Amino acid sequence: MEIILYILLLAIGFVLLIKGADFFVDGSAGVARIFKVPGVIIGLTIVAMGTSAPELAVSVSAGLSGSNAIAVSNVVGSNIFNLLAVLGICAMIKSLPVDSGIKKRDYPISLVATLILLVLGGNLVFAGKAHDFHNVDAEAGVLFRWNGIVLIVLFILYIAYTIYLAKKNKVEDESDTEKLPMWKCILLIVIGLAAIVGGGQLVVINAKNLALAWGMSETLVGLTIVAIGTSLPELVTSFVASSKGQNGMAVGNVVGSNIFNLLLILGVSSTIHPITISMASFVDLGMLLGVSLLAYAFVCTGKKVNRWEGLTMTLLYAAYMGYSIWRG
């Protein structure tokens, strides 16, 4: 009887995710149309912040409880999922055009943020004070409070610059679609975001319960279902945005979410309480940098991320998950 209930709640969670993303994208596109802002800018700001809400909630809660080492693995895992799985799956279904501003401005900012975090988080390694490289739980470095404040300041500067560009580069709406009133756009965004977050939680909790009921270990569940579950909002929102022709919003959501995760979430978490970076998390940060460079190469090789590149990215994510499970 419990298993039937888990399956029913899981199905409800997926319905909420899909319909929530539908409302969220329509509301966000409506805001872009009202302010004559390119969809990619909305994707980099409103949509990115909204879909990263689960990661922010998890990381801040962990920081307040003093056990925020989970914030690093949460952010790194989510960013790798965004780059390989979200972009990969969306590109496999339909080739993704990439805005020139993302190529020249936002993606490089994401790369620099990843590099900064790798250097700050591996301060013991780079200072030659870390010796036990084979122990995944050994200390590789510490993100101090002043590091967190620097990350938050960098995030504020990035958002201010993005808003400046939005005001500077207004676009005329050439579509025949009737503009939605602002109140309706906000209502769609709020309802959509609530459905996305709530649906994501239902999926994660009940998928975990099902997996445990079927004999999977908690470690395996944590490395697979829970890790992917917190990034479901990005996946569903980008997929729905792409299917509605909002490609700038789909790609902007991924890149914006990654910047949001690296600068604001880890900035807030380490400001609340210094974060100890384990050797495993340091290795994952290195992998994130490598994955970011690879995805950037795909973005820069043409005007689109094509289906074959999407397949390669998806297979790489499967390989990363296999490695994580083996290591765990």
Image (cartoon, rainbow, N blue to C red):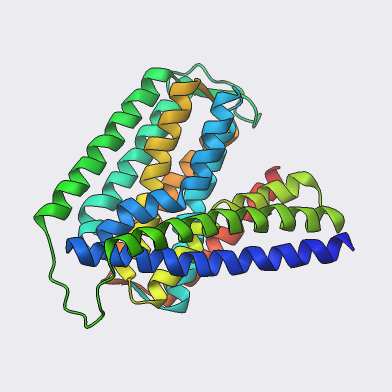
Point out residue 85 in the picture as x, y percentages from the top left corner. Answer: 51, 62
Image quadrant in which you'd find residue 109: top left
Residue 265 in the figure: left or right of residue 100: right
Point out residue 105 in the picture as x, y percentages from the top left corner. Answer: 22, 51
Above or below: residue 231 compared with residue 268: below
Residue 293 visible? The answer is no
Image quadrant in which you'd find residue 120: top left
Point out residue 273 in the picture as x, y percentages from the top left corner. Answer: 50, 20
Q: Nearer the viewer, residue 1 or 103?
A: 1
Point out residue 275 in the picture as x, y percentages from the top left corner. Answer: 52, 24
- Residue visible at 33% across and 76% down in the picture: 245
Q: Nearer the viewer, residue 180 or 196?
A: 180
Residue 293 in the figure: left or right of residue 81: left
Query: Which of the image's four quarters has the C terminus?
Result: top right
What is the residue that sits farthest to the bottom in this orientation?
Answer: 176
Q: Nearer the viewer, residue 18 or 119?
A: 18
Above or below: residue 296 compared with residue 57: below
Q: Nearer the viewer, residue 48 or 91?
A: 48
Q: How many marks?
A: 0
- Residue visible at 50% across and 64% down in the picture: 20
What is the residue that sits farthest to the top in this orientation?
Answer: 129
- Residue visible at 25% across and 78% down in the picture: 178
Residue 42 visible? The answer is yes
- Residue visible at 28% across and 33% down in the picture: 154
Query: Which of the image's four quarters has the N terminus?
Result: bottom right
What is the residue that sits farthest to the left in this orientation?
Answer: 168
